[in-house]
Image (cartoon, rainbow, N blue to C red):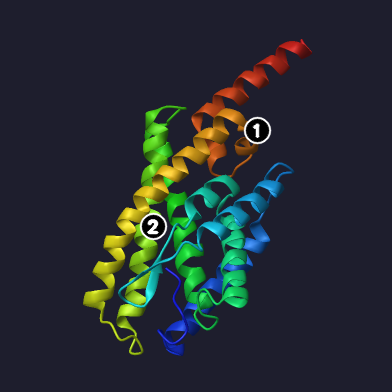
Amino acid sequence: MHIPDGFIPLSFAIPAFLITLIFWVISFKKIKLTEQQVPMMGLLTALFFAAMFVNIPIIGGTTAHLLGGTTIGLILGPFAGLISMSIILILQAFLFGDGGIVALGANVLNMGVIGIFVPCIIFIVLNKLLKPKLDSRLCIILFISALFSALLTAISAGIQVGLSPLSPYGLHIVLPAMITHHTIIGILEGIVNVILIITLLKLRPDVLEKSPILGKLSLFKNTNRIKNEETFNDEE
């Protein structure tokens, strides 16, 4: 998924960076983390920083690997999630040469903006429609969010590389390769997303209750309603 330097021209890289810059500014203004979420942000950043180093080279000049954007975005919220993913990609580009520096804006756009904001939107919409509790419906929503995140991120990167005049591969090669590989990655991503979030919901629901996204789950609303009723009864 990391686009290296030399595969997209400045005419692609600069607009991608400007779009990313807009999201950075908005995210820094909107970011809000509770005391429980601050160490969780560090943990998730470190976890997926390491996970991304398991790169599988594919035809088209890019790579396939776990992304983690859905998990980070749902737990921390999309604004903090974008900052977390940006830290990962910046460190990888500057310290390890994993992903280009000129292409950094495009990589953050793909994995940080599309890869985080899109699954959060999908989750919010499906949550309103299905109102899941801690059951199979919630697992399905978590899985679908991660799967589409991986696919749409791959499609975005594939289009950028495939349409680039600098790429030795055309769109007809890059895009099918990206979709094929990241369908498999998306399935793995969905499984990982379900396991991590369901485990946290069972063991540390207090961390997720303040999440801008997962905090909207009906099970938290019911819990808050019970707490409010108990507080009201105690006051009486």
Please indicate whether residue 51 sits to the left or right of residue 228 in the image.
left
Any part of residue 213 in sight: yes
Q: Which mark is residue 150?
A: 2
Instruction: Give the answer, above or below, for where 174 lies relative to 49.
Output: below
- Residues packed near mark 1 inside 10 Å, few (<14), some (14 to 19) or many (20 plus): some
Under circle 2, the secondary element is: helix
Is mark 1 in CB contact (under 8 Å) with mark 2?
no
Under circle 1, the secondary element is: helix
Q: Mark 1, mark 2: which one is toward the viewer?
A: 2
- Nearer to the camera, 114 or 228: 114
Please indicate whether residue 227 sits to the left or right of residue 217 in the image.
right
Expressed as whole percent of the image width and height from the top left, the position of residue 189 reads: 41, 50
Expressed as whole percent of the image width and height from the top left, the position of residue 8 reads: 41, 84
Image quadrant holding the N terminus, namely: bottom left
Expressed as whole percent of the image width and height from the top left, the position of residue 112 reads: 51, 63
- Nearer to the camera, 185 or 165: 185
- Residue at (32%, 76%) from the top-left corner? 60
- Residue at (47%, 27%) from the top-left corner? 134
Amino acid carrying mark 1 in the image:
Asp
- Residue at (55%, 23%) from the top-left corner? 222
Q: Which mark is residue 23?
A: none
Q: Quadrant of residue 129?
A: top left
Q: Which residue is mark 1?
A: 206
Looking at the image, tell me whether mark 1 or mark 2 is earlier in sequence order.
Answer: 2
- Residues packed near mark 2 inside 10 Å, few (<14), some (14 to 19) or many (20 plus): many
- Residue at (62%, 26%) from the top-left corner? 224
Q: Residue furthest left?
A: 172
Please indicate whether residue 50 sits to the left or right of residue 55 in the image.
right
Amino acid carrying mark 2 in the image:
Ala
